[in-house]
């Protein structure tokens, strides 16, 4: 059976049980998703968007529903929490909401399982759900639209400043088997609201599962959202994700995307600055070694005047790993006075490591300020010698410099508890990790 | 303490040092002067163990050991310190973590216990006074955004922390105003002991008024073409290098 047939059959078998089935508007989305997927199948390298990232390994497997896994305990989640951070938390195990592990405080911000919303109050999300992720462009987004099972719905009402960040914790277990979690999040910030949302994707054990996530963020006029995405999947897993952001007038969106895990990770981040004065900041850090493959494709659409975008991505690639960064900035004809900067810097830690970095600037307005740059390099000899000349051994010096290279990306995060957590992960991923940890 | 014998060094096949012989004994201060590009920094880098230089012949013996067999970090732990002509900015690496690691690398090597954070900060405060640096530099990244003078003072501060037996100061006086020069010189003089040798590269006699050398050498085209005492520096200041180069050519 071909891969496409496998998913078509699965859809036929499972559709009736998917949340919200029977709602005509939602059925329409799911059906359009599976049709689109049937039409195009998994992307091949002939597709320009997937030129450097082959998904044959995903296509070969027959991902289905997770096996019945042993229940996850709160204690097992401790390593994935941000110590010292007071936040609300929604936990998902193998793609399904786990209310017993979640904690949600009373307040004006609404947050709950998307599956529950689709079952009980689908009208709440009808306006936005699957309106921003383009299933024409991305076959995985289409597949997600068809199968979306659960995830979070977060709603920041008008003029409400959320008191606590919301942590969405997606845990995959090894005993879940080779399953696919088509998770879907919808974050809606109404006019004048502000908040912070952290998505983390982590693993208990070493499973070879597929996360196929789609997150949509809708920012009303003058709203503000700081979004964190921490990808720390199992090193045998596949992580595919699309983050689609729609920004209204004077809204401010900041994304921090940090990628450490997965055998193959691919994230598409698309922000549309669809009204005047919107601000979009995209910060990213990807670390890969061994045989990992990590790919970030970002697009910033400056559709209207006076928009500002800042994009800073750094990659640390070692072993035989490969990094891909494609940063597209599209300034529409109407988007005068756009101010856009993009930079992507990559550090290669081994001779076998590889990076493909490609900024793509398309500018159709004439009165704009745009800059971009991409570099791929090794550790600086002058810096290495300076550290060694003070008695720090070569490998520890390499580790310290690698750690230092990533530091400014982490420094952009406003939540100290998240910074600390990430620094703790980062330090374990640099050369001479133990010595470096001893120094810091 | 340090014996350099007929040292020849090339970079990418290009000869830069062409037979340097020099002896430095405990407690001595040597000054090396010479025109731009003559090889002064190259000599300091080779002594400190920088990679990328090819020693084509000659030997360097430090406290009886073959220095050329040692890695840069081993030399540092064993008491060699280089104050850089151009101190390197290292974004993202915190100055105080870096210095603590450096101090503890030396201590571990000597079989002493590592300093904890409290003991280290106490040491830092004591040594910072010596060169009049502000504590907040400790919270910043290594040399990042430091002014030229702060970078040079930071080098001497590191020397004070690490207490080397052989200090190589490469143009530590360049770019300093007169007050800063005096602070740096006082710092170095405070570290001058019978056990410690200092080799300083400079273009200016001015520094030698503050730190009086026992020996002065002129390095030109990769060779020491004249050595003398302090009066040689005064003469060079007055007459330039031309006459020494002519003497050398005639010989
Ligand atoms: N890595 C290198 N590659 C090529 N040439 C080099 C390298 N390092 C030094 N040189 C050359 O070696 C010569 C000596 O340089 P060095 O820096 O030692 O001079 P210096 O005496 O310290 O000069 P200054 O007084 O200007 O500091 C110069 O011609 C320089 O260009
Ligand atoms: Mg020099």
Image: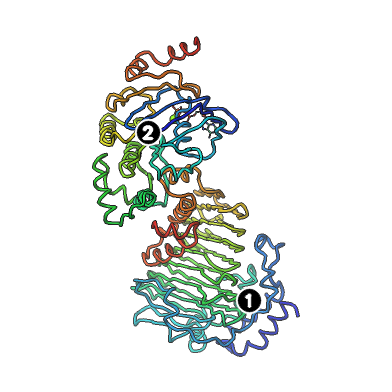
* A65 relative to B238 in the view: left or right: right
**Residue B251 on image: x %, y %:** 49, 11
Kind of element beneath mark 1: helix
Q: Tell me the crowding category of disc 2: few under 14, some 14 to 19, or many 20 or more residues within 10 angstroms, Cα based.
A: many
Query: For the N terminus of chain B, which image quadrant?
Result: top left
Subunit ID for the residue under disc 2: B
Reply above or below: B84 against B106: above
Q: Please tell me which residue is depicted at 63% across the width and 74% down the height of the picture.
A: A142
**Residue A213 on image: x %, y %:** 56, 74
Q: Please tell me which residue is depicted at 37% across the width and 36% down the height of the picture.
A: B166
Quadrant housing residue A386: top left
In front here: A58 or A263?
A: A263
Kind of element beneath mark 2: strand
In front here: A358 or A428?
A: A428
Tag 1–tag 2 contact (CB < 8 Å): no
> Could you tell me if residue A297 is visible in this image?
no
* B196 relative to A383 in the view: left or right: left
**Residue A89 on image: x %, y %:** 41, 78
Subunit ID for the residue under disc 1: A
In front here: A257 or B124?
A: B124
> Does mark 1's beta carbon lie closer than 8 Å to ligand 1?
no
> Could you tell me if residue A220 is visible in this image?
yes
Quadrant housing residue A63: bottom right
Residue that sits furthest to the top in the current view: B250
Look at mark 1 in the image and give the residue it sits on: A143
* Label at residue A402: none
Reply above or below: B127 against B34: below
Look at mark 2 in the image and give the residue it sits on: B169
């Amino acid at each position: 059976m071909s891969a496409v047939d496998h998913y078509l059959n699965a859809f036929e078998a499972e559709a009736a049980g998917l949340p919200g089935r029977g709602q005509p508007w939602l059925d329409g989305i799911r059906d359009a998703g599976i049709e689109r997927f049937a039409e195009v199948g998994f992307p091949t390298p002939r597709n320009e968007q997937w030129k450097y990232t082959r998904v044959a390994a995903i296509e070969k497997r027959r991902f289905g529903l997770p096996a019945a896994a042993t229940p996850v305990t709160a204690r097992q989640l401790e390593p994935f929490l941000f110590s010292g951070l007071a936040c609300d938390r929604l936990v998902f195990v193998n793609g399904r909401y786990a209310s017993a592990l979640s904690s949600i405080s009373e307040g004006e911000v609404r947050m709950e399982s998307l599956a529950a919303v689709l079952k009980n109050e689908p009208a709440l999300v009808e306006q936005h759900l699957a309106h921003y992720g383009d299933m024409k462009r991305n076959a995985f987004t289409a597949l997600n639209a068809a199968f979306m099972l659960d995830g979070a719905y977060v709603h920041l009402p008008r003029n409400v400043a959320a008191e606590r960040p919301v942590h969405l914790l997606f845990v995959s277990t090894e005993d879940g088997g080779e399953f696919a979690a088509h998770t879907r999040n919808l974050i809606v910030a109404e006019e004048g609201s502000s908040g912070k949302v952290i998505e983390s994707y982590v693993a208990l054990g070493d499973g070879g599962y597929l996360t196929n996530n789609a997150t949509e963020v809708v920012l009303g006029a003058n709203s503000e959202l700081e979004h964190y995405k921490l990808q720390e999947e199992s090193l045998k897993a596949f992580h595919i994700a699309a983050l689609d952001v729609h920004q209204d007038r004077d809204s401010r969106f900041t994304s921090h995307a940090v990628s450490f895990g997965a055998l193959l990770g691919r994230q598409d981040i698309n922000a549309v600055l669809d009204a005047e004065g919107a601000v979009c900041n995209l910060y990213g850090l990807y670390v890969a070694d061994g045989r990992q493959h990590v790919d970030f494709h970002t697009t910033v659409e400056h559709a209207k005047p006076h928009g500002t975008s800042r994009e800073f991505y750094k990659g640390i690639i070692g072993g035989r790993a490969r990094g891909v960064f494609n940063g597209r900035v599209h300034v529409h004809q109407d988007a005068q006075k756009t101010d856009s900067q993009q930079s992507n810097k990559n550090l290669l830690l081994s001779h076998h490591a590889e990076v493909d970095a490609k900024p793509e600037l398309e500018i159709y307005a004439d009165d704009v300020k745009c800059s971009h740059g991409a570099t791929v390099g090794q550790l600086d000899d002058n810096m290495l010698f300076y550290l060694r000349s003070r008695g720090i051994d070569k490998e520890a010096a390499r580790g310290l410099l690698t750690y230092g290279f990533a530091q400014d990306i982490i420094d952009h995060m406003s939540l100290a508890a998240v910074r600390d957590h990430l620094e703790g992960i980062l330090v374990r991923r640099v050369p001479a990790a133990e010595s470096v940890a001893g120094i810091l | 303490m340090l014996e350099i014998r007929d040292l020849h060094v090339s970079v990418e096949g290009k000869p830069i040092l062409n037979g340097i012989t020099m002896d430095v004994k405990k407690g001595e201060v040597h000054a090396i002067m010479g025109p731009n590009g003559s090889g002064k920094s190259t000599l300091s880098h080779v002594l400190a163990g920088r990679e990328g230089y090819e020693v084509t012949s000659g030997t360097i013996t430090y406290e009886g050991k073959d220095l050329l067999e040692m890695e840069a970090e081993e030399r540092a732990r064993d008491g060699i310190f280089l104050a850089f002509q151009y101190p390197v900015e290292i974004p993202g690496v915190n100055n105080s973590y870096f210095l603590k690691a450096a101090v503890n690398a030396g201590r571990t090597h000597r079989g002493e216990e590592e300093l904890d954070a409290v003991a280290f900060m106490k040491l830092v405060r004591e040594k910072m006074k010596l060169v009049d640096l502000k504590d907040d530099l400790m919270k910043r990244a290594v040399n990042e955004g430091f002014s030229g003078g702060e970078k040079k003072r930071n080098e001497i501060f590191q020397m004070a922390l690490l207490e080397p037996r052989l200090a190589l100061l490469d143009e530590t006086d360049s770019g300093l105003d007169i007050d800063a020069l005096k602070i740096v010189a006082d710092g170095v003089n405070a570290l001058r002991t019978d056990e410690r040798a200092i080799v300083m590269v400079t273009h200016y006699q001015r520094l030698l008024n503050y730190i009086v050398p026992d020996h002065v050498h002129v390095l030109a085209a990769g060779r020491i073409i004249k050595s003398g005492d302090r009066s040689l520096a005064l003469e060079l200041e007055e007459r330039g290098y031309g006459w020494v180069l002519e003497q050398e050519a005639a010989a």
